[in-house]
């Protein structure tokens, strides 16, 4: 117990974990898991209690401990932690690969499926076995010994390259700083952004040539406001260029992700070929709702046909406004957000910064928790736990009878050493055995600006939506009713359906009663006025066409890259330009290196899966339509959504879950209607 990573008696001891704990803990847990695997191979007769349960006991401890390490290197990255993570990553990856290729375990699962008692198993346990048999095949269990070695080597190198890709983006982001001497150059920026830039510069006072003026960075709480509000065009261009060239050949060679991209694609293609798949996309889709790369491409192109007229209209209106009102004869990429904000203010008298003053952190969180309680009859309250940073808070979720359902960490603010973006991840999943019931524990991570001078943080409406989105993922974990680990929460859920609960939650950020309840002006404490909300609502679908085709660009690029890309004939950038020819209305400059920062597909779980955002958005819009159709039955509809979708986890297919909730197959119409694209 001297090593906190080996202590599973309660909540993780994040305040005690040090880099030197990682190697020894992982070695112990790998040894224990290996012994459990060896014992499981010899079990006879094979039953759930004699085979599955002890195997899960040992492997879950390994994955839980390693998950804590993965999390820490994402939120408090240090050179020492990174070194320990990188040193242990190959060992953990090798074990995972060997587990998926173990023919003896494969045979045991087959024996379990053939046992007389299998017919008496519930649907959940049968789904666990079915998934296991499928995953053994996808993990290379049926390969020859030589091909197994090759498969394992590919997986190990892929894991290392994905980690390196992410670390390069983080380092390139943190390395940039632009010091501005004159406050006049910051014209247009919100006061809190200027204050944060001044405070950041003061922190650097001891560094040679630094500490003066205002420090601008590529962290989102600085970068996005500069692009949106800074009147200084050269300033916008400087940050846009730095942001677009991160982790590319324009910077330090050791941070260039170009070669990493090429190698990752080569390794993925090789892995798929070993298993007999035509492409990595085909391999990826073997565990998703979509059946083929062609089906996905068809879905994306069909949506593009519907969205492009709206996107072209959005672009034409912006160009005309920029010419007539802003004196810009040619819109550059670093003008888009700034000019769009000016147009939105002119058209709707709506400013994101004006609205932001009402979304103060305490009222937003209270409003979010109230939505959860009204939908699912559960209560969120503050709790205590060891944490990795002073900014992190901890909460518990209880049912109407006070029974603990789960707990979650909330890490809201951007900082150096923390990966950009927003995400949910599980720390511990629900599991019920004959002797114990384990409750879920999850991380919710964002990168918002922090309040200053003792004042609470204020959030843009987009940030509020992001928070609701991640909470939706968290609820998928926290409210699961499934007790079998492999299909509890998001485990076993098809990746292209995993965004359904998260995108569904975003809709409640647009309901007047909800918004009113979660707002209190930073100075006056007054809720958002109805008149301002109406302007916000009127602007809801502002440039939705352009936003949609931008997402389609990313998704189509990802799918083409993993299904039809030929490195002997094309470069990655050439492929991206062809996709842009097809669907883009706003083109990035030729020097821009978006792929070098596309962590979703090169360092996350979205390879040949980025389309999932739009695929799941069809499901989420249609699911929310059920609430629109019966507003007086909120509690009943919420209970049905909880029963048929959230609580089911991966115990049955996502389509079965959706159909059970809606009573029919999903429809595209609600998504088009919600985005203001129901008709041209």
Image (tube, rainbow, N blue to C red):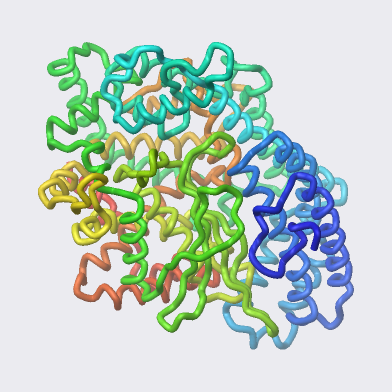
Q: Which of the two residues, 229 or 426, is positioned nearer the viewer here?
A: 229
Q: Which of the two residues, 520 or 375, is positioned nearer the viewer here?
A: 520
Q: Residue at x 23, y 76 (%)?
A: 633
Figure check: 117 above or below 627: below
Figure check: 243 above or below 345: above
Question: Residue 280 location in percent, x, y?
Answer: 62, 43
In the rendered view of the protein, which quadrant contains the N terminus? bottom right
Q: Quadrant of residue 578?
A: top left
| Residue closest to the far left | 531
Q: Residue at x 84, y 66 (%)?
A: 37
Figure check: 177 above or below 277: above
How many numbered badges does the structure rendering display?
0
Question: Residue 283 location in percent, x, y?
Answer: 62, 49
Question: Residue 57 location in percent, x, y?
Answer: 75, 70
Q: Which of the two residues, 418 or 149, is positioned nearer the viewer here?
A: 418
Q: Residue at x 78, y 70 (%)?
A: 55
Q: Quadrant of residue 314?
A: top left
Q: Residue at x 52, y 46 (%)?
A: 609
Question: Residue 496 location in percent, x, y?
Answer: 48, 54
Q: Which of the two residues, 520 or 105, is positioned nearer the viewer here?
A: 520
Q: Is residue 283 visible?
A: yes
Instruction: Please state if 277 lies on the left or on the right of 639 as rendered.
Output: right
Q: Quadrant of residue 234?
A: top left
Q: Is residue 653 visible?
A: no
In the rendered view of the protein, which quadrant contains the C terminus? top left
């Amino acid at each position: 117990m001297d090593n906190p990573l080996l202590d599973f008696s309660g909540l993780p001891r994040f305040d005690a974990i040090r880099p030197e704990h990682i190697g020894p803990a992982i070695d112990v847990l790998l040894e224990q898991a290996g012994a459990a695997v060896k014992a499981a191979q010899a079990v006879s007769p094979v039953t759930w209690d004699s085979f599955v349960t002890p195997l899960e006991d040992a492997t879950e401890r390994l994955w839980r401990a390693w998950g804590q390490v993965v999390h820490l290197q994402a939120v408090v990255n240090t050179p020492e932690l990174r070194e320990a993570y990188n040193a242990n990553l190959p060992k953990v990856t090798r074990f995972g690969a060997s587990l998926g290729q173990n023919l003896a375990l494969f045979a045991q699962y087959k024996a379990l499926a053939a046992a007389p008692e299998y017919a008496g198993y519930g649907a959940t346990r049968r789904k666990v076995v079915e998934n296991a048999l499928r995953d053994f095949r996808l993990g290379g269990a049926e390969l020859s010994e030589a091909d197994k070695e090759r498969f394992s080597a590919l997986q190990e190198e892929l894991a290392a390259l994905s980690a390196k890709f992410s670390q390069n983006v983080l380092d390139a982001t943190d390395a940039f700083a632009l010091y501005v001497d004159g406050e006049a150059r910051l014209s247009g920026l919100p006061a809190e952004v200027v204050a944060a830039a001044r405070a950041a510069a003061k922190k650097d006072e001891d560094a040679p040539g630094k500490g003066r003026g205002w420090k601008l960075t590529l962290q989102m709480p600085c970068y996005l406001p500069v692009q949106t509000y800074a009147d200084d065009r050269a300033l916008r261009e400087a940050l846009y260029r730095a942001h677009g060239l991160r982790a590319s050949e324009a910077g330090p060679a050791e941070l260039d992700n170009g070669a990493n991209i090429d190698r990752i694609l080569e390794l993925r293609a090789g892995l798929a070929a070993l298993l007999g798949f035509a492409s990595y996309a085909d391999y990826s889709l073997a565990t998703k709702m979509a059946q083929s790369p062609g089906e996905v491409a068809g879905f994306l192109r069909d949506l593009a046909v519907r969205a492009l007229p709206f996107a072209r209209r959005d672009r034409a209106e912006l160009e005309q406004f920029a010419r007539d009102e802003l004196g810009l004869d040619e819109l550059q990429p670093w003008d888009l957000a700034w000019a769009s904000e000016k147009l939105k203010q002119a058209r709707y008298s709506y400013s994101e910064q004006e609205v932001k003053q009402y979304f103060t952190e305490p009222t937003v969180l209270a409003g979010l928790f109230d939505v959860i309680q009204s939908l699912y009859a559960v209560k969120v309250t503050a709790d205590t736990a060891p944490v990795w940073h002073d900014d992190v808070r901890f909460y518990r979720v209880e049912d109407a009878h006070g029974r603990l359902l789960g707990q979650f960490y909330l890490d809201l603010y951007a900082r150096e050493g923390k990966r950009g973006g927003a995400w949910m991840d599980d720390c511990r999943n629900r599991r019920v055995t004959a002797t114990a019931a384990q409750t879920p524990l999850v991380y919710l991570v964002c990168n918002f600006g922090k309040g200053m001078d003792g004042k609470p943080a204020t959030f843009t409406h987009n940030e509020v939506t992001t928070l609701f989105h991640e909470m939706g993922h968290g609820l998928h974990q926290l409210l699961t009713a499934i007790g079998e680990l492999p299909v509890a929460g998001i485990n076993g859920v098809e990746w292209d359906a995993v965004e359904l609960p998260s995108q569904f939650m975003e809709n409640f950020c647009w309901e007047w009663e909800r918004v009113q309840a979660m707002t209190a002006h930073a100075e006056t404490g007054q809720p958002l006025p109805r008149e301002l909300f109406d302007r916000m609502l009127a602007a809801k679908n502002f440039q939705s066409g352009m936003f949609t085709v931008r997402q389609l660009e990313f998704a189509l690029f990802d799918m083409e890259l993993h299904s039809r890309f030929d490195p002997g004939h094309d470069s990655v950038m050439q492929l991206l330009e062809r996709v842009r020819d097809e669907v883009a209305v706003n083109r990035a400059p030729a020097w821009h290196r978006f792929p070098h920062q596309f962590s979703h597909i090169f360092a996350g779980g979205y390879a040949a899966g980025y389309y999932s955002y739009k695929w799941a958005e069809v499901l989420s819009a249609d699911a929310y339509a059920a609430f629109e159709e019966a507003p007086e039955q909120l509690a009943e509809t919420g209970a049905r959504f909880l029963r048929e979708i959230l609580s089911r986890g991966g115990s049955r297919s996502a389509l079965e879950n959706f159909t059970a909730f809606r009573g029919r197959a999903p429809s595209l119409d609600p998504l088009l209607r919600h985005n203001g694209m129901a008709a041209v």
